[in-house]
Image (cartoon, helix red, strand yellow):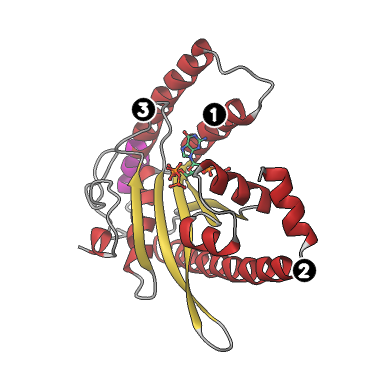
Amino acid sequence: MNTETAIMKITGDAEIQRQFLEMSHLYDAAIREVRTKLEILDREFSILYASNPIHHIDSRLKSPRSIIGKLERKGLPVTIESAEANLQDIAGVRIVCNYIDDIYRLAELLVRQQDLELVVQKDYIRNPKPNGYRSLHLVLRVPVYLSSHTELVPVEVQIRTIAMDFWASLEHQLRYKSDVEATAALKGRLKRCAEQSAALDVEMQSIYREVRRLAGCRDDGYDGDDSCPERVPQADYRSGAEALRQ
Ligand code: 0O2
């Protein structure tokens, strides 16, 4: 069954539509919970330390077309059960920060919350992808309290700086615009931009720390160093909350 046939099946079948609505409600609730947690942290930082770690937050529910496409690419059954069992990015939250320190600080604060469980962590800042992509990815399981029971729902959280986000959006266009050929020259130029923007992030971080020190700002208790603070352990795919809670 190709993607179009699968979409036709979904849109034409009342029972599948109902299941899809139920699933969307669940993942949307999980997104809202994560967003609320982040807004609370950001507000607290602004009150206590006169700083806002979060520049802005984006979130999205993966569309049926994109869910079906991903299941097909992975050779998995195209059903709601299969999507729930195999895809961890149906719910996605992207946090865009000013500085690299903010990324690790937020990750640490999220993972410390008792009701969130860290399932997967991928640190593409310490270990950028070969194309230059940088971002910290966490998959968190979030409890959603329903009328009859509680569901633990995975949410993929991507945390990156403004510079990383700027780069990723152009690279995304190059990758997904089928009418633009991703030549080696374009890829090479993008890779160089990734290196330059990584250096910019490090320098901006350093200047910001110095400015805060000179201004005598209240210490936020975070002792990150240089570009990649050691507080968040090396990227890996292990399960469990221990990775960041150590
Ligand atoms: P979209 O449209 O953003 O949703 P997995 O999800 O684990 O099965 P993968 O690719 O190994 O698959 O996961 P990974 O590496 O954590 O990447 C997931 C998401 O990160 C992607 O989602 C992108 O949003 C982003 N991403 C990862 N690598 C790149 C990259 O090289 N360039 C850009 N621009 N974004 C990247 P989707 O589903 O691919 O796309």
Q: Give 53 or 126, whichever is nearer the viewer.
A: 126
What residue is shown at x 38% (from left), y 32% (from top)? Answer: 129
Q: How far is disc 2 from disc 1 in space, using C-alphas?
A: 38 Å
Indicate the amino acid at tag 2: Ala
What residue is shown at x 27% (from left), y 48% (from top)? Answer: 236
Helix, strand or loop at mark 3: helix
| Among numbered discs 1 and 3, the one appearing first in the sequence | 1
Task: Single out the mark in the foreground, 1 or 3.
Answer: 1
What residue is shown at x 36% (from left), y 57% (from top)? Answer: 107
Indicate the amino acid at tag 3: Ala
> Residue 52 location in percent, x, y?
47, 55
| Residue furthest bottom as drawn | 148
Labels in figure, total: 3
Q: Is residue 11 magenta?
A: no
Q: Which residue is mark 2?
A: 14
What residue is shown at x 52% (from left), y 38% (from top)? Answer: 165
Mark linked to residue 171? 1
> Residue 208 location in percent, x, y?
37, 41
Mark linked to residue 199? 3
- CB contact under 8 Å: marks 3 and 2: no
Q: Is residue 207 magenta?
A: yes
Q: Is mark 1 within 8 Å of ligand 1?
A: yes
Q: Which residues are magenta?
A: 206-214
| Among numbered discs 3 and 2, the one appearing first in the sequence | 2
Can residue 34 be seen here? The reply is: yes
